[in-house]
């Protein structure tokens, strides 16, 4: 399983890349592997405010449906429109073209403490 350094991770297998006041959110390779072939993604609309660990969408696979939770609080500034037509992009590129949403965030130092580093996430996944 690939885990990318420089990202933060949730126990629900979302990742977040923070760049200043912007954050990109996706699901991990572990999540994609567990779900199987993803067939559908439904995400909250731009302009929606989300709190940390609040539901921001759902992905469906041939095996199951799974809620996606926001790793940080913020306002959704954009949604990956490519996923509506090609949800399988999540399977082939979970850390690249398969990103889910971009958030406008404020200072989230306190919320970041609720997330894991790449090293911590790798250890966490080993316990599952």
Image: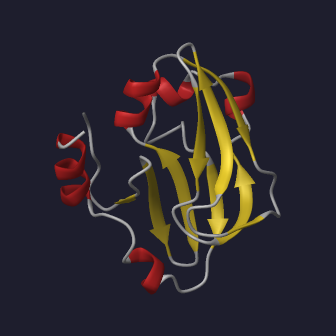
- Specify the quadrant of the image occupied by residue 10: bottom left
The residue depicted at 19 percent of the width and 43 percent of the height is 127
Please tell me whether residue 90 is drawn above or below residue 21 in the rendered image. Answer: above
Q: Quadrant of the N terminus?
A: top left
The residue depicted at 34 percent of the width and 35 percent of the height is 30
- Specify the quadrant of the image occupied by residue 92: top left
104 left or right of 115? right
Q: Nearer the viewer, residue 74 or 20?
A: 74
Q: Residue furthest top?
A: 62
125 left or right of 59? left
106 left or right of 115? right
Q: Residue furthest front?
A: 128
124 left or right of 105? left
Q: Quadrant of the C terminus?
A: top left
The residue depicted at 50 percent of the width and 82 percent of the height is 108
The residue depicted at 45 percent of the width and 61 percent of the height is 17
Please tell me whether residue 124 is drawn above or below residue 65 in the rendered image. Answer: below
- Specify the quadrant of the image occupied by residue 33: top left
- Give residue 27's position: percent from left, percent from top: 48, 43
- Give residue 72's position: percent from left, percent from top: 55, 68
- Give residue 37's position: percent from left, percent from top: 51, 16
- Give residue 25's position: percent from left, percent from top: 54, 54
Q: Nearer the viewer, residue 62 or 5?
A: 62
What colour scheme was applied to this rendering of the protein?
secondary structure
């Amino acid at each position: 399983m690939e885990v990318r350094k420089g990202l933060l991770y949730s126990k629900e297998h979302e990742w977040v890349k923070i760049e200043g006041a912007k954050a990109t959110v996706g699901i991990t390779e572990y999540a994609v592997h567990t779900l199987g072939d993803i067939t559908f993604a439904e995400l909250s609309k731009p302009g929606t405010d989300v709190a940390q660990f609040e539901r921001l969408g759902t992905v469906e696979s041939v095996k199951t449906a799974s809620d996606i939770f926001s790793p940080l609080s913020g306002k959704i500034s954009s949604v990956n429109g490519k996923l509506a037509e090609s949800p399988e992009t999540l399977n082939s590129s979970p850390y690249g073209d398969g990103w889910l949403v971009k958030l406008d965030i404020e200072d989230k130092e306190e919320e970041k403490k609720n997330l894991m580093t790449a090293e911590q996430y790798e250890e966490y996944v080993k316990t599952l």
